[in-house]
Amino acid sequence: MIKVEKRLETPKYLLILTPIVSVLVALMFSAILLLVTGEDAARAMNTIFGGSLINWQEVLVNSVTLMILSIGVAVAFKMVVWNIGAAGQMMIGMICAAGVALFAPIALRDSIFLIPIMAVAAVIGGGLWALISGGAKAIWNVNEVITSLLLNYVALYILQFLVFGPWKGVTSSGFPQTDPFPAAAKIPAIFETGRLHYGLFVALAIIIIFYFLLNKSRWGYEIRVIGEGRNVARYGGMSLSKNIIIAMFISGGLAGLAGAIHVSALEGRLSPHMNTDIGYTAIIVVWLSRLHPLVIGIVSVFMGALLFAETNLPAAGIPSEIAKLLQGSILFFVIAGDFFSRYKVKYVKE
Amino acid sequence: MKKLLWLGLVLVVFAGVALVGCNGAAKDDKFKVGVIYIGEPGDAGWTYAHDQGFKAAVKAIGEDKVELVIQQNVKEDQSATQAMEALINQGAKAIFATSFGYMDYIVDLAAKYPDVYFYHCSGYKAADNLSTYFGKIEQARYLTGMVAGSQTETNKIGYVAAMPIPEVVRGINGFTLGVRSVNPEATVKVIWTNTWYDPQVEKDAANALLKDGIDVVAQHQDTAGPQIAAQDAGKWSIGYNSDMSKFAPKATLTSAVWNWEVYYEPAIRAAMDGTFTSEQYFEGLNEGIASYSKLSADLLKDKGIQAKVDEMEAKIKGGYNIFTGPLKDNTGKVVLEAGKAHNDGELLSMMYFVEGVIGTIPK
């Protein structure tokens, strides 16, 4: 008979191997589904992976935003605080950055300090926005899943109020959008040939900093302990509320920063169509990465490619749903694969 | 050892996937036309009308010579750039973008790809390889307004409007002038939805108007929501984009419709044979890009209205500008002296309501 037994300790190689094998199984599973439904599986895979190699800059444009968002989400998740509100916090970050870019005093408008001030405003804005849920959680133990999710919609309405109302640009011929930001507010592209911008280096720096903070520092240790058992942490003299508030602020602050970089490098103005659904994709990235900052970097690139595939597939005349199918099956198989790294399956003779 | 074997296997599979990927997309010698839509052709409105136009153009040129590649539901943010980049990378030589909000992104891409032809609907920024195109749908709206004006019993007409921008304002004004040319007592009440596409919001807005005693609902939206609301209330409506009588046959008197193939066919042909010239296309009833659908004869109260519409249509096709003075705005201020008319520039930036419109343009 087959016997399932809990592993006392997961071997290191399994931790690396199971996700890779799970992704491959997901690829095969999707390919089989495509064959069964009559799509040209080879051509679809070509378009997804070959297309991503050719358009690596566009892929990384997606990844930069994902990396910063995902690190933010991971900080909260490490503590088992479920911040689902990255999308809204990112939007607040965009709004704060735009506010600085549009209404900065003349002296600042051409200054190299404009972008850093936009970034700081966005971090504070996004962080405080997340603190609405974080504070309610810390003080009254209100479920943060619900509050952070619902606040996403509030953030969207704030954006719409601003661009339809007081922030509507004088140069936009009545269209609901702000004036363009001054030139100094734009994070430049790295190469002349594409959109990949210097935000990439900020994202990489954040990954490295948070790798050390989360895995090597005392603070990282504290929030890990809290995540694993609140009572243990309390006995250890760690303040729960204080850490929830700090973690939520950092989590939201990073999402805000992602918004500032996104709006500065790629948009250059606000319109009601600013889309921050990528904040939900970040949750998938974090889950697939098992909250590990360095893995988040890699998975963000992979997910950035799948996001690009969603636009590249229809451009090749293939339904974009295939990219979603792939995303879904990868998530499914990785979570299912988790089982094998935690349990041993043995065949025992009776 | 076993671990190494596993690792090796994984690497081989990944390399395989990457290699297959490098082969690139299938090549063919059809001329590829890339299109980005704000919605889906199934909306029966704006995107549907464009889609019909592209299909007709491709059919006329020959499906063996030209191929359409379509991106649907493209947001008006930076993801539009990604959608167009993907089309260009797949070999599209001409890119059509069918919503105003794509303007800044398409201007950037036109500078980056000088060998690709770009066409932007309803924008005002052109370049050497970027044309803009639009139509004077307000002329068609004038004609449909005449139908509405002859139909109303309460002398109250409603208008569900998407966004307070010149395009929409011009349409409301053209419609209202048409209404009042046959019925000087009638007014047109405007309600803003602040969305192009939201069937429920559009319906709700129409219902709010209907509760107010309005008996003909016109619209500038992307779906037939207002038409359906009018039919449910047992009132009438004027459609937009395509013939909406198929959604609300008991309510739709006529619709102001787009015939985009009038522009698309020659534009694609010119791109194919290399005779592209950058232009700012802005025509109306004369070229047929804007027109109106057949009047629903059995719904009409004034059976003689068709003759009046025909007469006016001929006059506009003959060069008559529907925005000819004397013309007052809805605060009573004179905007055009007798004999004066708005030029195209004034039309494209029109931000006031003519006399007879009830409503304000948010500043």
Image (tube, coloured by chain):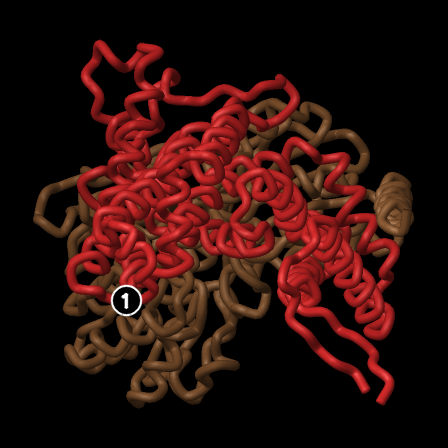
In the rendered view of the protein, which quadrant contains the C terminus of chain B? top left
Q: Residue A60: give x, y in percent of width and height.
A: 61, 35
Q: In terms of image quadrants, where is residue B118?
A: top right
Instruction: Using a 10 Å C-alpha cutoff, classify the residue at mark 1 as few (fewer than 14 neighbours), some (14 to 19) or many (20 or more).
Output: some
Question: Chain letter for red?
Answer: A
Q: In terms of image quadrants, where is residue A122?
A: top left
Label 1 SS:
loop
Residue B352 to residue B303: above or below = above
Tell which of B152 and A186 is nearer to you.
A186
Residue A245 to residue A138: above or below = above
Q: Residue B59: give x, y in percent of width and height.
A: 78, 58
Residue under the image location 88 percent in, 56 percent down:
A42
Residue B113 to residue B86: above or below = above
Residue identified by numbered label 1: A143
Residue under the image location 78 percent in, 30 percent down:
B274
Circle 1: residue type: Asn
Q: Residue B345: give x, y in percent of width and height.
A: 37, 32
Tell which of B205 and B168 is nearer to you.
B205
Residue under the image location 50 percent in, 65 percent down:
B45
Q: Residue A232: give x, y in percent of width and height.
A: 33, 59
Residue B209 in view in this figure:
yes
Tell which of A236 and B2 is nearer to you.
A236
Q: Identify the colour of chain B in the image.
A: brown
Residue under the image location 47 percent in, 35 percent down:
A216
Specify the subunit that label 1 lies on: A
